[in-house]
Image: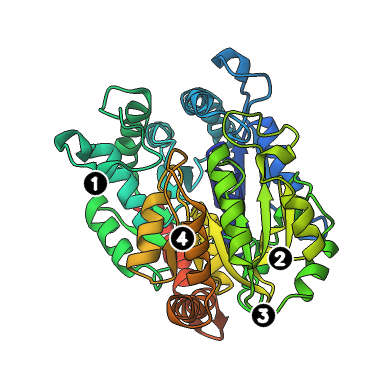
Amino acid sequence: MDSQEHIVMLPFLAHGHLIPFLALAKQLQERTGFTITIASTKLNIQYLRSSISTDSDFKILFAELPFCSSAHDLPPNSENTENLSLDRVIKLFYASQSLEYPLLRLLNDIIDQEGRPPLCIISDIFFGWAVDVAKSVGTVNVSFSTSGSYGTLAYVSFCLNLPHRFTDSDEFLVPGFPETADGTDVWSKFMQQQFSRCLESYGWLCNSVEEIEPLGLDLLMKYIRLPVWAIGPLTPPAALKSSSSSHASISRQHAGKKPGLPLEKFLDWLDLQSPDSVLYISFGSQNTIGASQMMQLAIGLEGSRKSFIWVVRPPLGFDLNGEFRAEWLPEGFEERIKQSRRGLIVRNWAPQLEILSHKSTGAFLSHCGWNSVLESLSQGVPIVGWPMAAEQAFNSKMLMEEMGVSVELTRGIQSVIEAKEVKRVIESAMDEHGKGGDMRKKAAEFKELIKLAVREEGDEKGSSLKAVDDFVGTILYKRKE
């Protein structure tokens, strides 16, 4: 294989996109020896560098693209979606289009140095404009969705067709999509523009595993009429302990986040619990819930008498990075939990993968963000779904209906939930028998399928590794045409 080939990667400006891009970059570099450059803004490059464990043999290049958030009516240093309110997130989406010219300049510099354009650009599906940039310098663009196949298909087709405009039915109210999305609002306009350009890419990469969503993958290929390579799971490496080493040596532990407690505290506490007895609760780095939802969740949780680790942050309407106040939980709740040693209430962040991989963890109450879904399934942990944004409602539907590894508690940040329903759903999901037992059994099956997808023994390769190699071979062949 020609090790002089060069691939340029362009992730969207969000941590949940940067980490899978970094994992893919590492894998491509290891399997091909190609030069891989990840291009992003200054602070995102810093985040990526901090995500790499210092002892890893990383040969990926980083290229800084100039970006000034305050020129786009955003607070200074707003270079990714972390801690931005929804109205500012959409501003960041639009502002990200200003990376077009810096990317073009980077590509021209590479051409000047190497005498030919890169083999391809791998750009996020939110960067449809990269298709034209690639063409203008004589290379091809490949669109990369950091979501699963089914979630990607549902999200893209929903945005391009806006089916809810043609019905009065409530069936089409999907969390993550403004009800006002009608093709003229800012969200629809942006997504339609980018996704329609991505349909002219050379092909798509998907952070999925063929065996866990064969139907979604098949439907996505039929819908976009392009090759789709399922190359997941692109999770931190500990998620795949006993499988291929080619998945990146990355840990979110080093990614600029400080856990509310030392790692040993979590592990020591988990060691004291029975197998499969702990409910882990986290809504991802971007989300929180409403104050009344938080209160009902706490009451229901306490009523269930299940052990838990709950990552809390201020409720909706308060500064996400502000101090967490005891008044947002029932009176005396934290004290009672501490005394009974039945739970850990953690401010802001916890080492998710280490918690999910512990034998005591029995279920994950999650927003159904795709990275969290993959991390949970890679450990055989079933999910209690609470989808909130983007394609999460579609992920939740698939986890329940196609895969049987999940039960849904509620949807969205406006929903009304009651403590007794929280208690009922948690008890059902954590039950060793019945629904909970079935979910755990199926989750364990998916854990094995994920391991097989990235295993390499002799000439035998798992489906995701085959897909990576096939993608590289196809792009090289395209270069020779």
Q: Residue at x 46, y 58 (%)?
A: 421
Q: Position of residue 23 (x, y in %)?
A: 60, 57
Residue 170, image quadrant: top left
For label 2, the residue is: 354
For label 1, the residue is: 171
Mark 2 and mark 4 lie on one chain; the one further toward the N terminus is 2
As measured in the structure, the alpha-carbon distance from the residue carrying label 2 to the one carrying label 4 is 33 Å
Q: Position of residue 124 (x, y in %)?
A: 47, 42
Residue 275 marker:
3
Q: Position of residue 119 (x, y in %)?
A: 48, 48
Mark 4 and mark 1 lie on one chain; the one further toward the N terminus is 1
Q: Is residue 200 left or right of residue 327?
A: left
Front position among marks 4 and 1: 1
Amino acid of disc 3: Pro
Evaluate whether residue 51 shows in this view. Answer: no
Residue 308 marker:
none
* Residue toward you, 412 or 464: 412
Residue 414, image quadrant: top left
Amino acid of disc 1: Glu
Circle 4 Cα neighbour tier, 10 Å, few/some/many (<14 / 14–19 / ≥20): some
Mark 3 and mark 4 lie on one chain; the one further toward the N terminus is 3
Residue 472 marker:
4
As measured in the structure, the alpha-carbon distance from the residue carrying label 1 to the one carrying label 3 is 39 Å
Amino acid of disc 4: Val
